[in-house]
Image (cartoon, rainbow, N blue to C red):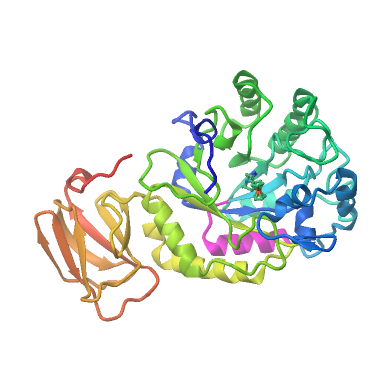
Amino acid sequence: AQDMPDMWTKSGGNPTHPGLKWFTEAKFGLFIHWGLYSKLGGRWKDSSYYGSGEWIMNRAKAPAAEYAQVAKTFNPQGFDADEWATIAREAGVKYLVITAKHHEGFSMFDSKVTDFDIVKASPYGKDPMKALSRACRDNGIQFGFYYSQFLDWHEPNGGGNSWDFKTKDKDYQQYYRTKSIPQLRELLTNYGPLGLVWFDMPGGLTPEQTKRMIDSLRLLQPNCLFSSRVGHGLGDYRDFGDSEVPPVPIDGAWESIYTHNDSWGYIQHDLNFKSPEEIIHLLSNVASKGGNLMLNVGPDGDGKWPQYSINYLKATGKWLQQYGESIYGTTYGLIPAQPWGVTTSKPGKLFLHVWETPANRKLRIPGVDAKVKSIKILGTRQTLTFTQQPGETTVQLPVTLPDTRNTVLVMEYDGQQSDLSQLRT
Ligand code: H79
């Protein structure tokens, strides 16, 4: 986990923001990192790079003009917006966020602000974001853009180390005025209603300037959420460090983001993909703390997803078809994590995510004083026998559970949530 200064991650947003309803119910999102780095796939000249493939320009110290040449070979003929959105829907994600521009500075959308975009600088010559935004909406998926508002290694005045520009004497104001803000306006104008804009790595602006920028962007789409990495506590929901889950339940709207293998951008030699079981456990664990999981996929330079990502996401979607009621629209589990797994909640219901079956097949649920009415295997009519004592309920598990990775039991109880031990930060 990266150390993110609190100033960046704190959500100071408006708790009555209209977008927070879909966001807090969504629980599962898909992040897509796609840019020129996807074409490089972790290779620059004769060297291979591992991890964070989208950083290859910086890590290989590629001069901006030379790196820009990659655009001339970027021609993702395999890109199919409907196919992407269909896999996303089958995976069970409720929102999709794609890199409109990452730190490399290349615009993956039709931009009038620069020539360094996929329409003018690449043989592809079309705007894939037009098709994708439409396909997501057709499939009932909220659509959002990642936008690197400060780091831009293509622009002499953009933030960060591009190796042939001097870091000193940069005019960040000029960069924001001529690229960042106009492009954000394009994104908030040309792609229909956006669920959110995912800002990353703030810098170069005072809190007052950031607020002015944000306030003017909000006028374009009042329902669109802004992520906390816009900086200065001005976001609408909270993101933690990359690949970080908070240790305790957190109130309010928040999200954990994870790579599928060990990179955001496509890396041809990285096959360390999280298994369906790992994804499902991540999802139920994040939900048990009250947040959303946004899992990343890195399509290649042709526009195809790694086959493992397709297969494992579909397997996750299959699990969600059976057990989605224990994820979507839930709040954090009202009892602490147990040796056997974690819990999520809805009014009158506690969902028990069984990761590990106790050897004696007796599942202990401490911290419950409400009267337990029934305990069932979710998605079946199978009722389990249980005994209840003050502060502890014990369920007898059957010899075989339908899903050895994460069977979900649903405990229905009479009375208030306050009869369960309430976890708070
Ligand atoms: O888009 C993904 C990252 O590229 C971006 N945020 C996620 C969502 C990000 N930008 N900056 N950082 C993350 C933090 C920077 C980490 C670094 Fe490194 C450590 C830069 C250099 C050393 C990671 C490892 C990137 C290159 C090597």
Main secondary structure found in the magenta portion? helix
Residue 226 visible, this orientation: no
Residue in the picture at 59% in, 71% down: 311
What are the residue bounds of the magenta stretch?
Answer: 80-95
Q: Is 274 rendered above or below residue 118?
A: below
Residue 402 visible, this orientation: yes
**Residue with the most extreme top position:** 208
Indicate yes or no whether the magenta region holds residue 20.
Answer: no
Q: Where residue 98 sits: x, y (%)?
A: 66, 49
Indicate yes or no whether the magenta region holds residue 91.
Answer: yes
Number of marks: 0
**Residue with the most extreme bottom position:** 399
Q: Is 166 rendered above or below residue 346?
A: above
| Figure quadrant of residue 76 | bottom right
Residue in the picture at 30% in, 41% down: 424
Q: Is 122 rendered above or below residue 209?
A: below
- Which residue is at the front of the view, 103 or 160? 160
| Figure quadrant of residue 266 | bottom right
Judge left or right: residue 122 versus residue 106.
right
Q: Where residue 338 sits: x, y (%)?
A: 28, 59
- Which residue is at the front of the view, 110 or 309? 309
Q: Where residue 184 sits: x, y (%)?
A: 71, 34
Q: Where residue 299 sits: x, y (%)?
A: 70, 61
The quadrant of the image that shows the C terminus is top left
